[in-house]
Structures are given as C-alpha cells and as structure tokens.
Image (spheres, rainbow, N blue to C red):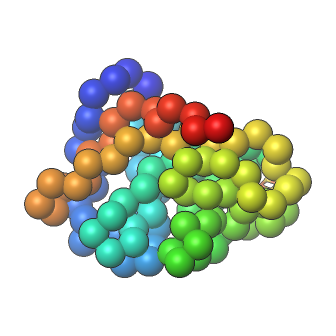
C-alpha cells in the first residue's frame, strides 16, 4: 500500500467495540473501534483464508480471534497472541478527524 492517508469510513459506521471490513487500495483491511480510537490491520488471517472481522473482537484486550481456528492477534500492532498463526498481521496507521477515519502507511514493527 502506498504511503499517505485515505478516508475509508465514517466513525459512526463502526460500532464502538466493534469492527468493519473496508477495502484500501484493493487490500482488505479490518477497522477496530475502541471509543474514539480506531485500529487498522490486514483482514485476511495469516494462517489460512479467513476474514478476521468475521471473528470476535475483544476491545478491552485489543484482540481479535480468527473465526476459523482461533488464532488471536493484537489489533494495535498485528502481533500474534495465540497460535496456530505464527506470522503477524500488517497493522496500519490510522487518523480520526471529526467523523472521518483514514488509514495510512504500515506501522513499523515494535520488537
Ligand atoms: S485461518 Fe485464522 S487461525 Fe486458521
């Protein structure tokens, strides 16, 4: 995905504590809302083919559980918390301005 932010949703389209799948430059990205904060992460599980936004989101833990085999990912940085997935997801920068949510460049790994 190219650098720069694009508006992908309105804040009120994402339920608080919920998620929404959007397409950003042809790539499927999951948006996760916690209050006025939004996190963005690639939506296809790195284990096999499943949409993480069809799984369960725990806003307190910032964690999504894959609907297929139960891997869990930290939506803030894409890291794996529970196997069987071993490869992290790509997490993206997000800006919320007014009611507009924009997704930007990939976050850099924090390890
Ligand atoms: S496809 Fe997500 S854990 Fe297997």
Residue at 15% x, 54% y: name it: 97
Residue 10 appears in the figure: yes
Is residue 34 found left or right of 62 in the rendered image? left
Position of residue 101 relative to residue 55, above or below, is: above
- Near-viewer residue (41 or 55): 41
Residue, far right: 84
Image coordinates of residue 48 in percent, x first then y, are 80, 46
Position of residue 107 relative to residue 16, above or below, is: above
- Dividing the image into four equal quarters, which quarter contains ligand 1? bottom right
Residue 100 found in image quarter = bottom left
Residue, far top: 2
Image coordinates of residue 95 in percent, x first then y, are 26, 48
Residue 28 appears in the figure: no
Residue at 33% x, 64% y: name it: 37
Residue, far left: 98
Is residue 95 found left or right of 19 in the rendered image? left
Is residue 32 found left or right of 50 in the rendered image? left
- Near-viewer residue (6 or 90): 90
Image quarter in which the C terminus is found? top right
| Figure disc tally | 0
- Near-viewer residue (43 or 90): 90
Residue at 22% x, 55% y: name it: 96
Is residue 99 found left or right of 27 in the rendered image? left
Residue, far front: 111
Image coordinates of residue 64 in percent, x first then y, are 63, 65
Position of residue 26 relative to residue 83, above or below, is: above
Image coordinates of residue 98 in percent, x first then y, are 11, 60
Residue 92 found in image quarter = top left
Image quarter in which the N terminus is found? top left
């Amino acid at each position: 995905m190219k650098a720069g932010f694009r508006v992908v949703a309105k804040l009120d389209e994402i339920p608080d504590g919920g998620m929404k799948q959007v397409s950003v430059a042809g790539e499927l990205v999951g948006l996760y809302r916690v209050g006025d904060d939004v996190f963005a992460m690639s939506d296809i599980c790195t284990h096999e083919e499943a949409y993480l936004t069809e799984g369960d989101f725990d806003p307190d833990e910032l964690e999504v559980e894959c609907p297929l085999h139960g891997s869990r990912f930290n939506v803030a940085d894409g890291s794996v918390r529970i196997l069987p997935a071993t490869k992290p997801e790509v997490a993206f920068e997000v800006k919320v301005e007014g009611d507009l949510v924009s997704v930007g460049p990939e976050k850099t790994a924090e390890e």
